[in-house]
Amino acid sequence: MTRTDYGAVLLDQKNGSYFQVNEIGADMITALLDTNDPDRAVRAPHDRYDVPLDALRTDLLSYLQQLAQSGLIDDDLR
């Protein structure tokens, strides 16, 4: 994952596909990679951006589903 001014980009080096997320999405994915705990992955963005936890959980699951469908993560990591 590479951070940008507007979030982050994840690149699949095998086929050149990429996935772009906003800053909140980048924070959640970074926290998930660091902790491997979806609940902790949404806590920091919730505190930082004052976004409802339910919305962040929904977004995280959506990100993970899209990443799995794109082949950027293993399907069993969702």
Image: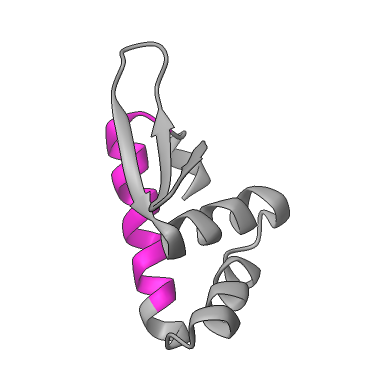
**Foreground pick, 70 / 4:** 4
Residue at (33, 49) in percent of width and height:
65
Q: Position of residue 51 (x, y in %)?
A: 43, 85
Residue at (63, 58) in percent of width and height:
31
Residue furthest front as drawn? 5
- For this view, does 15 lie left or right of residue 44? left
- For this view, does 1 lie left or right of residue 60? right
- For this view, does 33 lie left or right of residue 72? right
Residue 64: in magenta span? yes
Residue 75: in magenta span? no
Q: Quadrant of residue 73?
A: top left
Q: Position of residue 28 (x, y in %)?
A: 52, 61
The main secondary structure of the magenta stretch is helix
Q: Position of residue 60 (x, y in %)?
A: 42, 63
**Foreground pick, 41 / 25:** 25
- How is the model colour-coded? one colour
- For this view, does 46 lie left or right of residue 6? right
Q: Is residue 21 above or below residue 72?
A: below
Stretch in magenta: 56-72
Q: Is residue 36 above or below residue 1?
A: below
Q: Quadrant of residue 37?
A: bottom right
Q: Position of residue 45 (x, y in %)?
A: 54, 74
Residue at (36, 80) in percent of width and height:
55
- Total of numbered circles in the picture? 0
Residue at (35, 41) in percent of width and height:
67
**Foreground pick, 59 / 24:** 24
Residue furthest top as drawn? 14
